Amino acid sequence: MKLFIDGEKSRAICNHCKDIVSVTFVRRDVPFSDRKGAAQDILVGVCDVCDQVVSIPAQSTPAISESRKKALKSIEVRLPAIYLDVLDLAAFTLEPESTPEFRKDLVCYYIHDLAQDPNRLERVFSAHKLSVVNFSSKKSKIPSKRLSMKVSGKLKAELQRLEVETELSTTDLLKSVVCDIQREVLEKPKSSKIKTLQFLASVAV
Ligand SMILES: [Zn+2]
């Protein structure tokens, strides 16, 4: 088996250019076939003419299948930093001594809560509208931060079902979830939910 190294050149057929082209091996994020996430920093052959990925060497297969497995049970997005601030504030408001991990529990709780709600579509769309009104900035680029969580297969499936139903990307859906939290915890606290969440915040590690 031929092993390739970064920067190495080869030749391959490019479907986009419809020609045999010169190829350079570089590290790229490769989307999974179902488009739900991507494997990061995978060595691939890129067409020197159109910059499209034209070949994936055999040596990259284990890395792709490993990150596919990981992606099945994790949620990873980059959100504008303001959303993480809202999450921190909500977690702090519920329990000033809550652990940093609690904000992830909060997101998971809301994904599950939304998935169970018969009015979930209205709730997601109105929260999504809020996120566009409140936190979009055309003037300056807001720095983004990574939110990454390990979740159960069941919760991941609930999130994916919500994505399908709302036709929102994972990022937009999670922005909406944060705005839903902002609404129910910070702006118009729902006492029944607040009690449950405070209980969770006290026991979560
Ligand atoms: Zn090409």
Image: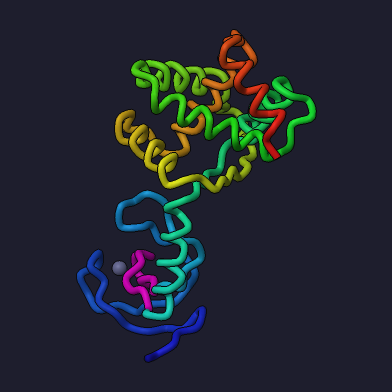
Is residue 18 depicted above or below 169 in this figure? below
Q: Position of residue 95 (x, y in %)?
A: 74, 24
152 and 183: which is toward the camera: 152
* Chain part drawn in magenta: 45-57
Task: Confirm whether the magenta stretch covers residue 88.
Answer: no
Residue 61: quadrant of the picture: bottom left
Q: Position of residue 138 (x, y in %)?
A: 55, 28
Farthest-out residue, right? 97
Residue drawn where x is 39% and y is 90% of the image: 2
Farthest-out residue, bottom? 1
Residue drawn where x is 55% and y is 32% of the image: 107
* Quadrant in the picture for the C terminus: top right
The colouring scheme, among rainbow, by chain, secondary structure or one colour, is rainbow
Q: Is residue 54 left or right of residue 75?
A: left
Is residue 123 depicted above or below 27 in this figure? above
Task: Confirm whether the magenta stretch covers residue 56.
Answer: yes
* Quadrant in the picture for the N terminus: bottom left
Q: Is residue 191 left or right of residue 48?
A: right
Residue drawn where x is 57% and y is 16% of the image: 193
105 and 160: which is toward the camera: 105
Residue drawn where x is 38% and y is 57% of the image: 31
Is residue 138 depicted above or below 38 in this figure? above
Q: Is residue 62 left or right of residue 198?
A: left
Q: Position of residue 19 (x, y in %)?
A: 22, 74
Which quadrant of the frame does ligand 1 lie within? bottom left
Is residue 202 depicted above or below 41 in this figure? above
90 and 59: which is toward the camera: 90
